[in-house]
Image (spheres, rainbow, N blue to C red):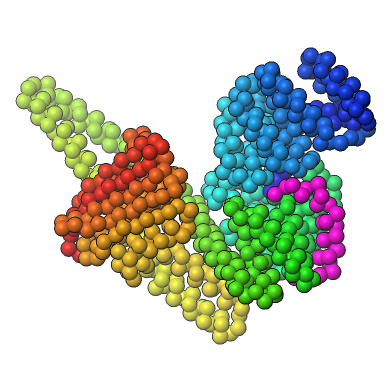
Amino acid sequence: MFVYKCPKPILILFFCLVSGISRSQNLGDHDKVVHTLDSISNFVERANYLLELIEQESMDNDAVAKLALQYRDSSLAKKRWEEALMFTNALGTYYIYQSINHKKAYGILDDYQPYVNFNVDENQIALFYINYAEASTYMQYYKKSLEILDEGIQFMEKQKDSSLYEFGYAYLKAGENSDKVNEISESVAYFEKAKKIFAHQKDTLMYLWAQNGLAQLYGKNGLYNRAQEARGEVFEKGTAIKEYQVVAIARLAACNEANRKNDFAEELQQIRMALKERNHESDVQGIVDILTLSYAVSTYARNGIRDTSDLYKRELVSKIGPHINNPFLETYYHLAMSWNTLANNQLTQAERYAQKAHKGVKGTLEAQNIMRSELLLANIYEKMNNLQKSLQHFKNYARMKDSVNNVTSRRRFAFIQAELETEKKDMEIAQQRQDIKILDAQNKEKTYWLVFGGVILVGGSGFLWLYRNRRFAEKEQELTEKYSQDLLWQQEKEREHIARELHDSIGQQLTIMSKKARDTDQKELLQLSQNTLEEVRMVGKGLLPPTLVSLGITGAIQQLIYTFDEEYSIIFTLEMDSIEGCFTKDKNVNLYRFIQEALTNMVKHSQATEVLVEVLKETNCVKLLIEDNGIGFDYEEKHKGQGLGLKTMEKRIRMMGGTIQIQTMNKRGTSIIANIPISDA
C-alpha cells in the first residue's frame, strides 16, 4: 500500500482556494470572493490572487471544494480544457488525500476522462492518470485502475521524459494492482521498472515504496526469505532518511506474514515497532495511523491482550471520523472493532462489525480480508452457539484458504520455474540464431550450385531445380509439423515422468519424514514436511491430472468442467457421451489438454457468461463442440500473430488425425468444432 504525494503546485492552488474562502465568515464575504474570482479573466492571475489568500484563517473545506467543482464545470462548458484539468486534479487530490472521500474523487475524475486528450500539458495529464488510477484503487476497482495506468504509461512513454515523477509512480501502482489480480510475473516486472526509474531520479523515498511493494508481493506468495531481504532495505534506508511512513507500512506487512505463519511472537513484535514508527510526522500520517491502530487492535485482541487492545481501540475510534467514507480503511476499522468486541464477549456488536467488514470486501479481489471476515464470523457464531452459521462460515473460510494456497503454490512454482529457465532460454535462443546463420549459409551454397546447374542445363536443369526446391519446402514443412507433434508428445511424457518421480520418490520421502517428525513430536518439522508434501501433490496434479487414471477420460473431462464451474462466475453446460475405449492413453491426455486449453482461453479472454461443451460419440468418430457467448476475436489476426495458443490447439487435434474449425467474430462469441476419428485403445 502506498499513498501518492501530490506535487506542491496543485496543493498550493487548491489550498489557496481553501484559504481564500476561509476568511468568509458570512454570505457577504463569500460573495465578494466569488465576485473577485469571476472578475479575473486570466487563469494565472486568478491563481496568484488565490495564493495571496492562503494566509487567511481556516474554513469549511467541503464548501471550498464545492465552489471549486463549480469553477471546473464552468471551465468545461466553455471548453477551457487546461483550466478544467487543473481544477480536476486539485479536487481529486483533496478528496483522495485530505477529505478521504474516494467515491467523490472517483466521480469527479471519471467525469473528466473523455476530455483529457484535449490537453497539451504533459505534467497535468500525467497527474490526472495517477489521481484517476489512485481513486479507482481505493474504490477497489483494481482492473479498472490497471487499464487507466496502462493508458497513462503509454502516454508517458511517448513523452520520453524519465524525469516525470508520475512516470515511476505509474509503474509502482501497476505493480501493486497486478498483484491484487494475481499476475505475479507482471507485478514483479512493474516494481522493478519503478525502482529503476526512481533510482535514476534519485528519489530514495519512492524507491523504498517500490521495494516495499516487491517485499509484500514475495511474502504474499510464500517467498519469505526474499520478502525479508527486500524489507530489510526498507527498514534500514527508510529509518536513515527519516521517512517513517514507509517503514511503518513495511512493519504491517511483516505483521501479516507472521500471522500467516502462526508466528505470534513475531506478529506482536512487528506491531509494537509499527506503533512506534507511526508516531513520526509524515505526509500520509492520517492513513498510516488508522491502518496501524486497526492492526494493533486486531492483533492484541486475537492474542488475548484485551487491555492493550482496548487502549488502542479508544484512540482508533477518536480518529476514524474523517476516514469513515474510505472503503479501504473502513474494512480494517470494522475488522479491528469486531475482534475487540469479540475478545470482550460483546457478541452482538462483534457480529455487526464483522458483517459490515464482510459486506465491504465481498465481491472484491481482497482475498485475505475476505478470509479474515469469514473466520471472524465463524468464531463469533461459535460463541453465540449458532453452530450452523459458524460451520458455514468456517467452510467458506477453509474453501477459500485452500483455493488461495493452491493458487499461491502454483504462482510460486511458475515464478521460480520461469526464473530458472530464463537463462536457459537465452542460451537456446543464441544457439538457434547461430544455427540459423549456418543454415542460411548452407542454403545459399545450395542455391548457387542449383543456379549454376540451371545455367548449364537450361530448361531441363531449371525444371529440376524448381522441383527440388518445392520438394525441399514440402519436406521442411513436414519435418516442422512432425517436430511440433513430437515436442507436444514429449512434453506430456515429461510431465508424466516428473509427476511420477514427485509421487514415488520425493512424496514417499516426505511421508516418511512426516511420520518420523510425528513419532518424535517435532511439531515444526511435521508442519513443514506436511506443507511441502501438499505442495508436491499439487504440482503433481498439474503435471498429470490423476482423474485421467482414476476416472477415465469421460470422468476426467466431467471433473474438469465441474472445476471450472466452481472457480469462475461463468455458467458451464456439459452434454457428453461416454467415450471410454475410443482412444489410446496418449490421445486421451491430448484430448484432455485440448479441452483444458480451450476453456482456459475462454475464461481469460472471452468475457463470456455462458460456455457450452458437447462431446458426442458417433459410429466412427467423436464430435467435440466448445462454444461461448463472449466478445470473440479476429481469428486471422490472432492466427498470424506470435501467440502459440491457437496453433497448439490445432496441432493437438491433427496429432489425433482429426479436423478442427474455429468460428469467431468480434463481439459474437466463439465456437470450436472438432471431429476426431475413433482408434482402438
| Residue at point 78%, 32% (across, down) | 66
Residue 500, image x and y in percent? Answer: 37, 68
Considering only vertical position in the picture, is 367 above or below 43? below
| Left or right placement of residue 188 versus residue 486 in this view | right
Count the numbered circles shown.
Answer: 0
Is 219 contained in the magenta span?
A: no
Magenta residues span 303-327
Q: For this rendering, which residue is in front, 566 or 446?
A: 566
Residue 271 as seen in the image, left or right of residue 474:
right
Q: Residue at x 76, y 24 (%)?
A: 71
At a point 88% along the width and 29% down the height, the residue shown is 21
What is the quadrant of the C terminus in the image?
bottom left
State the image quarter where residue 497 is shown.
Answer: bottom left
Pinpoint residue 522: horizontal percent, then vertical percent.
61, 80
> From this viewpoint, is residue 229 visible?
no
In the figure, 428 relative to 413: above or below?
above
Residue occupying the point 38% across, 59% down: 561
Left or right: where does residue 372 sit relative to residue 24? left
For the stretch drawn in magenta, what is the main secondary structure? helix
Residue toward you, 292 or 488: 292
Q: Is residue 385 above or below residue 658?
A: below
Q: Position of residue 596 (x, y in %)?
A: 37, 55
Please indicate, yes or no, whether residue 519 appears anywhere in the rendered image. yes
